[in-house]
């Protein structure tokens, strides 16, 4: 379900929820605070929150309603999210960040997306439940799934993965100096901390985490260089954009093909979901089923 681009959709929804929580807090607290002081003009917290509500209010409320009806209807029908599936979705996003440990992933989410692992899991759960509700009456036969599986062998093959490290510098001259130091026995991780200008990996000794060889985050010129690079060997200098990098592979995981039984349910959900005409229609039906009363409007 998820990919790197999909993450930003999650983040957008989480930002909306953050706004909603912020409004709820200040409305319930009743505190009259200043949001900012500009010269001799004070912008009150109430004015700030009011402006947010006026600009984003309907979108946030609709989003909150949609989430609530999905969770309520899923509970009523006994539809739950499989923990293994949830863990897999989180792992895919973790991999896209290049995080090796849970703490690194949590830190990366806060720094780069302004959210938490808990909030991300809640968002993924919502998306999976919505998909399950939208496809609950759609039947897909096993022979249809098997045909798709057999006709797309590359799609269900897991590519080789590498645990990759990098040192990124600004000039070819400096890259040559770093390469020479490595050839003389300098420690790769130590040099990465001292010389690399990549903000995301320098402090971790250049550790990019586990990366698939077909990952979009790896430029083609990098894939070409590391494709035949041995374990614990340093690459030649690679020009990446206007910067220069040296790579090192700590470990490798061989490519493997996923079995039909392994991916059958995942494929079934995908095929069924492709037959859903409109999520907006599904959400409107769920609203009517659960019952929604918006202040000042007739029940939905």
Image: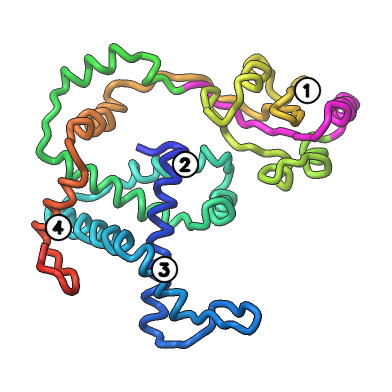
The residue wearing badge 3 is 52
101 horizontally vs 268: left or right: right
Confirm or deny contact between disc 1 and disc 3 (CB under 8 A).
no
Question: Which mark is drawn over residue 93?
Answer: 2
253 horizontally vs 243: left or right: left
Identify the mark nearer the N-term, 4 or 2.
Answer: 2
Q: Nearer the viewer, mark 3 or mark 4?
A: 3
The residue wearing badge 4 is 287
Q: Secondary structure at mark 1?
A: loop
Q: Secondary structure at mark 2?
A: helix
Q: Farthest residue in the top direction? A: 151
The quarter of the picture where residue 98 lies is top right
Is 56 colored magenta in this rendering? no
* Cα separation between marks 1 and 2: 29 Å
Identify the mark nearer the N-term, 1 or 3.
Answer: 3
Identify the mark nearer the N-term, 3 or 4.
Answer: 3
Label 3 Cα crowd, 10 Å radius (few <14 / some 14-19 / many 20+): some
Identify the mark nearer the N-term, 2 or 3.
Answer: 3
Label 4 Cα crowd, 10 Å radius (few <14 / some 14-19 / many 20+): many
Query: Is residue 13 at all visible to an observer of this figure?
Result: yes
* Cα separation between marks 3 and 4: 25 Å
Image coordinates of residue 255 in percent, x first then y, are 49, 19
Q: Which residues are magenta?
A: 159-186
Question: Which mark is drawn over residue 237?
Answer: 1
């Amino acid at each position: 379900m998820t990919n790197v681009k999909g993450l930003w959709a999650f983040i957008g929804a989480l930002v909306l929820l953050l706004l909603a929580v912020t409004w709820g807090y200040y409305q319930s607290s009743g505190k009259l605070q200043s949001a900012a002081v500009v010269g001799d003009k004070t912008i009150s917290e109430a004015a700030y929150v009011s402006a947010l509500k006026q600009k984003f209010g309907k979108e946030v409320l609709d989003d909150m309603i949609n989430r609530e009806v999905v969770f309520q209807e899923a509970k009523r029908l006994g539809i739950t999210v499989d923990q293994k599936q949830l863990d897999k979705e989180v792992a895919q996003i973790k991999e896209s960040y290049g995080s090796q440990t849970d703490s690194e992933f949590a830190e990366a989410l806060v720094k780069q997306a302004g959210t938490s692992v808990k909030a991300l899991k809640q968002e993924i759960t919502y998306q999976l439940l919505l998909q399950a509700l939208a496809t609950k009456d759609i039947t897909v036969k096993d022979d249809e799934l098997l045909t798709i599986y057999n006709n797309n062998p590359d799609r269900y093959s897991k590519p080789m993965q590498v645990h990759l490290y990098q040192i990124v510098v600004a000039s070819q001259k400096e890259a040559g100096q770093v390469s020479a130091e490595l050839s003389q026995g300098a420690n790769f991780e130590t040099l990465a901390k001292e010389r690399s200008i990549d903000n995301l990996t320098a402090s971790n000794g250049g550790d990019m985490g586990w990366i698939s060889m077909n990952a979009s985050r790896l430029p083609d010129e990098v894939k070409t260089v590391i494709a035949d690079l041995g374990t614990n060997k340093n690459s030649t200098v690679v020009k990446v954009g206007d910067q220069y990098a040296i790579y090192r592979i700590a470990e490798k995981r061989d490519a493997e093909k996923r079995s039909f039984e392994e991916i059958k349910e995942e494929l079934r959900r995908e095929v069924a979901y492709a037959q859903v005409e409109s999520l907006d229609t599904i959400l409107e039906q769920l609203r009517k089923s659960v019952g929604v009363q918006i202040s000042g409007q007739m029940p939905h």
